Image (spheres, rainbow, N blue to C red):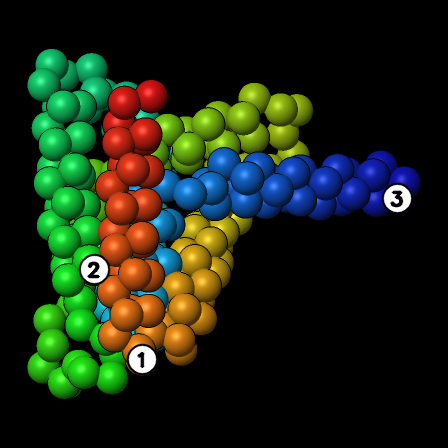
């Protein structure tokens, strides 16, 4: 009985440690998280949901790729890592341009262009920070005296991916409320676009 209670307590401690590690490492500013805030600020909540879904599912795909060891095999092939980096940088520059040039919310019609599901998915799977951060958290959890199975770690990290990106999106949509004024909209969009480019450069070059 005592052993069962002790094991359960250890399990919950490891779940909490995994959640905290994910918040710090995976939730830190990077291309995907900054893009969520920027898109939310530039386009509002509802128009950003397709892009959000793409980023979330793409990041979960990265999680599964890392957990299955596929990422290690891919990056061992010459030329694959640079292709991923170039693809990610190219789309992020395009996304930064769209954010920087987005008109104020009050001027947008229902047909205005916005980042979509496919764009979000492609950014996530080509995001170099995602692989490094997820691999660090996943490997760190696996290296401990582990009461958690692989499936539990995957479920916890998948839930954290959803929560982290939703929080970053909501942070962006909070800015959207003050972006009805053209000058404020232009300044905020330019700041977010520049931040997105800078965080991408940092993730690729470090």
User: Which of these two is toward me, 64 or 22?
Assistant: 22
Residue 169, percent from left and from top: 39, 63
Residue 57, percent from left and from top: 29, 55
Q: Mark 1, mark 3: which one is toward the viewer?
A: 1
Residue neighbourhood size for the residue with mark 2, other residues' Cα within 10 Å, grouped as few (<14), some (14–19), many (≥20)? many
Would residue 128 be seen by someone viewing this image from the given angle? no
Residue neighbourhood size for the residue with mark 3, other residues' Cα within 10 Å, grouped as few (<14), some (14–19), many (≥20)? few
Instruction: Evaluate if marks 2 and 3 touch, with contact meaning CB atoms under 8 Å apart.
Output: no
Decide which of tag 2 and tag 3 comes sooner along the chain: 3
Q: Is residue 152 above or below residue 102?
A: above
Q: Quadrant of residue 115?
A: bottom left
Would residue 140 be seen by someone viewing this image from the given angle? yes
Helix, strand or loop at disc 3? loop
User: Which of these two is toward me, 105 or 71?
Assistant: 105
Residue 23, percent from left and from top: 54, 44
Could you tell me which residue is drawn at 31 percent across and 78 percent down? 181
User: Which of these two is toward me, 90 or 181?
Assistant: 181
Taking the view exactly as shown, the residue that stands out farthest to the front is: 183
Helix, strand or loop at disc 1? loop
Residue position marked by numbered label 3 in the rendering? 1
Instruction: Evaluate if marks 1 and 2 touch, with contact meaning CB atoms under 8 Å apart.
Output: no
Decide which of tag 1 and tag 2 comes sooner along the chain: 2
| In the displayed structure image, the side of residue 105 where residue 156 appears, left or right | right
Residue position marked by numbered label 1 in the rendering? 180
Residue position marked by numbered label 2 in the rendering? 99
| In the displayed structure image, the side of residue 134 where residue 85 appears, left or right | left
Could you tell me which residue is drawn at 14 percent across and 85 percent down? 109
**Alpha-carbon span between mark 1 and mark 3:** 61 Å
Could you tell me which residue is drawn at 47 percent across and 32 percent down? 138
Residue 186, percent from left and from top: 25, 65
Q: Is residue 104 above or below residue 131?
A: below
Which quadrant: the C terminus?
A: top left
């Amino acid at each position: 009985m005592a052993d069962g209670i002790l094991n359960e307590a250890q399990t919950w401690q490891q779940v909490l440690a995994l959640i905290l590690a994910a918040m710090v490492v995976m939730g830190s500013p990077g291309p995907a998280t900054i893009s969520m805030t920027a898109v939310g600020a530039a386009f509002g909540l509802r128009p950003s949901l397709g892009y959000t879904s793409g980023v979330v599912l793409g990041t979960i795909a990265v999680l599964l790729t890392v957990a299955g060891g596929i990422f290690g095999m891919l990056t061992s092939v010459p030329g694959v890592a640079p292709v991923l980096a170039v693809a990610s940088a190219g789309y992020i520059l395009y996304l930064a341009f769209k954010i920087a040039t987005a008109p104020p919310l009050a001027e947008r019609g229902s047909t205005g262009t916005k980042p979509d599901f496919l764009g979000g998915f492609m950014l996530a799977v080509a995001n170099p920070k995602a692989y490094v951060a997820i691999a660090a958290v996943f490997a760190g959890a696996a290296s401990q005296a582990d009461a958690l199975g692989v499936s539990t770690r995957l479920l916890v990290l998948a839930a954290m991916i959803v929560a982290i990106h939703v929080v970053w999106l909501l942070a962006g949509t909070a800015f959207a409320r003050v972006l009805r004024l053209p000058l404020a909209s232009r300044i905020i969009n330019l700041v977010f676009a520049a931040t997105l480019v800078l965080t991408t450069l940092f993730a690729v070059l470090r």
